[in-house]
Image (cartoon, grey):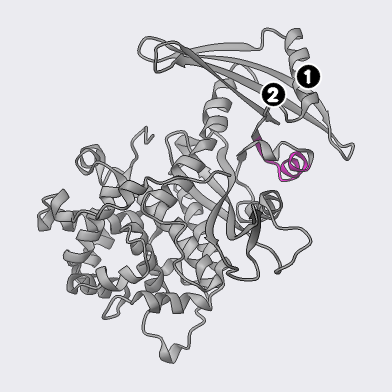
Amino acid sequence: MKRHRSNRKLDSLEIPRMEDLFDMAPEEQARVLRSLLCTIRHFFGDFASLFSSVTDPRNPRKTLYPLGGLAFAAVMMYLCHLKARRQIGLLLRTAAAMETFAALFKVASVPHGDTVNDGFCGMEPEQIQSVLCSMIAMLIRKKVLYPHRVLGKYFAIAGDGTGTLSYSRRHCPHCLTQTQKGKTTFSHKVFEAKLVTLNGFAFSMMTEFIENPGENPKKQDCELKAFYRLAPRLKQAFPRLPVILTLDSLFARGPVFDLCGSLDWKFMIVLKNRSLPSVHRQFEALWQLHRENRLTWRSGDKSEITREFRWANGIVYTDSKKRRHTLNVLECIETKPNKKGGPKSTTFKWVTNHPITDRNVMALANEAGRPRWNIENRGFNVQKNGGYELEHAYTADPVSAKVFYYLLQIAHMIAQLLYYGSLIGRAGRRKIGSAKNLAFLILEAWRHSRLTNIALEALSRERSRITFCPDTS
C-alpha cells in the first residue's frame, strides 16, 4: 500500500477560472452538460432510479429533496473537483443550475452541502455499495468491457489497500493506530477491488473498510483480513463473472490460493524474490528441464524494448498448514534504454493458477499481471491527487463518510466513461487537454447552461452509440 504524493507547490496555486482556460460559447457549455447527462443515461438510465432501492432514513414529512438528488449533488461535487462539501452551496446553486436540477429531480433548488451530509448520516452504506455493483453489472451486461477481457474471457480485478483519512487524535472507536517515535497516528483505510483494463480503466467494484472493532483490539484489522471478508462478498455480487485477480506479493500465500480456488477464480499474484523460496527453486529446476518454455517479444519504433518470458507449470507448494497447491510461475525480464541510452532491465514475476503456454503468456503478463498498477496510478493516485480529494474529511460522521466514499467511486467511474467516450471524442480531448480541465468544463456548464423539462425529455429520447478510444493510457 503506497502513500501518494501530490505536488504541494501546484496545490497551493490559485485555481484558474474557467474563462481563463477556455472561451466557451453557450452552445458549447450546453453540449458538455448534455454529454454528461447523456453518458449517465446511456449506461445507467435515470440517475434517480439508481437509488430507488436505497432506504431513506429521513422523516418523509420533513423531506424536500429525494435521495437520488442528494446523491447527485455529491457526485457533481466530485465531478467538478470542488474539493469540499461547502462548495456545493457556493458554486452549484446558480439560477441555471436550479432549473436543471428541477428538471432532473422535480424540486426547486439544489441542496446545500450540509443538507446532503445530514441526509447521509442515517443511511446504510452497504446499500450504496449495492448501487455501485449494479452500475458495474450494467456495464458488463451492455458488453462495454468485453473488448478488455483477458484471453477473451476473464475480467481482471485488482485488489489493494490505501489510506483515506489520518488524524493526530482518535476520530472514532474504529480508528487504526500506528505509533512511530512516540507519536501515534489514527487513520482509516480501505481495501478495494477495482476492475482494471489494459487501456487504463479502473472502476471500483467492491470496498471493504479496514477498521478496528473497538478502541483496544487484541489485533488490528489489516489488508489481508479485509481481503478475506471482501472476496465472498464480491463472489455473491457477481456469482458468474469469470474473474482473474491481480494482487501484490502480500497475497502470495496458501489461504489466498485456497480461497481463490473455492470461488473458481484465477489469479496473478506478484512473486518477490523473498516470497515462497521453495517455489523459486522449483521454478528454476523445472525450467531447466523445459527450456522451450520461453518467448521473446520486441516493441518500440526501433525494437529497442525487449521482453524475455520464461515459465514453468505444475509447481507443488506446501503451505504452513501442510496444504498442497499446484502453481505456475511466469517471469518477464524487460530491457529498454535508460535516460543515458544504456540498457536497463526490470524483472517481473507472478505466480498463477492458470496454465501458461506460448499462446497465452503475453496476455497473462500484459493484460492481467502488469495492469495491476492501474489500481494505483489510475485509481488511488487520481482520487487523491487528481481533484477528488479522497483524503479530505468531507464529514465527521462515520456513516456519512462511507456514503461519500462510495459516491466518489461512482463519480470517478462516470468521469472515465465521459472523458474517454466518443461524445467528447479525440478532438474534444485534445482541446480539453486533461481530465482535470474537463472538471472545470463540467462546473462551468452546470453553472451557466440551462436544461428545461422539454430539453430533458428530448434527451431521454435520444439514442446514442458511445464507443471508447483504444488506448486511454
Q: Residues within 10 Å of mark 2 (few under 14, many from 20)?
A: many
Q: Residues within 10 Å of mark 1 (few under 14, many from 20)?
A: few
Task: Tell me the distance, in whole angstroms, between the alpha carbons under discs 1 and 2.
Answer: 11 Å
Q: Which mark is residue 329?
A: 2
Quickly name the residue at label 1: 281
**114 lies left or right of 330:** left
383 or 107, nearer to the observer? 383
Amino acid at dot 2: Val
Tell me residue 155's x, y (percent): 55, 40
**366 lies left or right of 76:** right
Tell me residue 332's x, y (percent): 59, 19
Q: In this rendering, does residue 202 appear at all?
A: no
Q: In this rendering, does residue 154 appear at all?
A: yes
Instruction: Please say if 276 is above or below 392.
Output: above
423 or 440, nearer to the observer? 440
**450 lies left or right of 101:** left
Q: Which residues are magenta?
A: 255-267
